[in-house]
Amino acid sequence: MEDVGSGCLIPRMTPLGAGILAAIVTVLADQASKLWLLNGFDLARRGAVKVTPFFDLVLAKNVGISFGWLQNDSQGAQLALMAVKVLAVIALAIWMARSHTRLATVSLGLIIGGAIGNGIDRFVHGAVIDFALFHIEIAGNTYNWYVFNLADVAIVAGVAGLLYDSFLGVPAAKAP
């Protein structure tokens, strides 16, 4: 146990533990948001919901990969995408277990959690459930960003964390 200055004792978490926790929290937050939007909020029945002048909730089912590429809803294509995702998660988990910095480990946990969250969608719904849409109107024309979800946010944050750790993080000790 470690005293962190606030007078309370908290367990000290290893970097690997922090990465695993990041993955678990990501999967839970992603799936909870999708369950609520689909069942509690009933986004499918409501259609697009304007939240702010630049952000809407919409329901989109992505049978392809990132940014809607490789759209194919055949069972063979879906199985192939799931196989690639499983292999990627295994490779990322090995990398996470061997990681030497907390930032890289947590970043890999975010990517793993996002991949698992989207994989659950593909398994349960046959497609990834996306719902967040940012847009801007300029001179009467509306420009939309890709529709995304919390798993996608975690993946992007994880990649950003890995890039930061690679370029600006603590340099590795050099051999004598």
Image: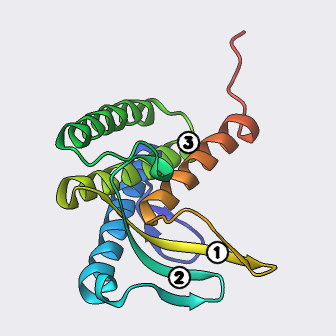
Mark 1 surroundings: few (<14), some (14-19) or many (≥20) residues within 10 A: some
Please state if 36 lies on the left or on the right of 176 as rendered: left
Which residue of the protein is positioned furthest toward the right in this rendering? 139
The one of 76 and 175 positioned closer to us in this rendering: 76
Q: CA distance from mark 3 to mark 1?
A: 31 Å
Q: Which residue is at 19% across, 37% downward? A: 76
- Closer to the camera, 3 or 155? 155
- Residue 24: % across, % down: 33, 58
Q: Which residue of the protein is positioned furthest toward the top in this rendering?
A: 176
The answer to the question of whether label 1 and label 2 lie on touching residues, with beta carbons closer than 8 A, is yes
Q: Which residue is mark 2?
A: 56
Residue located 54% across and 50% down the image: 158
Residue tagged 1? 135
Mark 3 or mark 1, which has the lower sequence index? 3
Tell me how far mark 1 sits from mark 2, CA to CA. 8 Å
Tell me the residue at 68%/12% (across/down).
175
Q: Is residue 125 visible?
A: yes
* Residue projecting furthest to the front: 140
**Vertical side of 30 occupied by 69: above or below:** above
Residue 62 as seen in the image, left or right of residue 56: left
Residue placed under numbered mark 3 in the picture: 104
Per the model, the C-alpha gap separating discs 2 and 3 is 32 Å
Give the label, 3 or 1, closer to the camera: 1
> The N terminus lies in which quarter of the figure?
bottom left
Q: Is residue 46 above or below residue 26?
A: below
Q: Residue at x 37, y 53 (%)?
A: 113
Residue 78: x, y in percent?
Answer: 24, 43
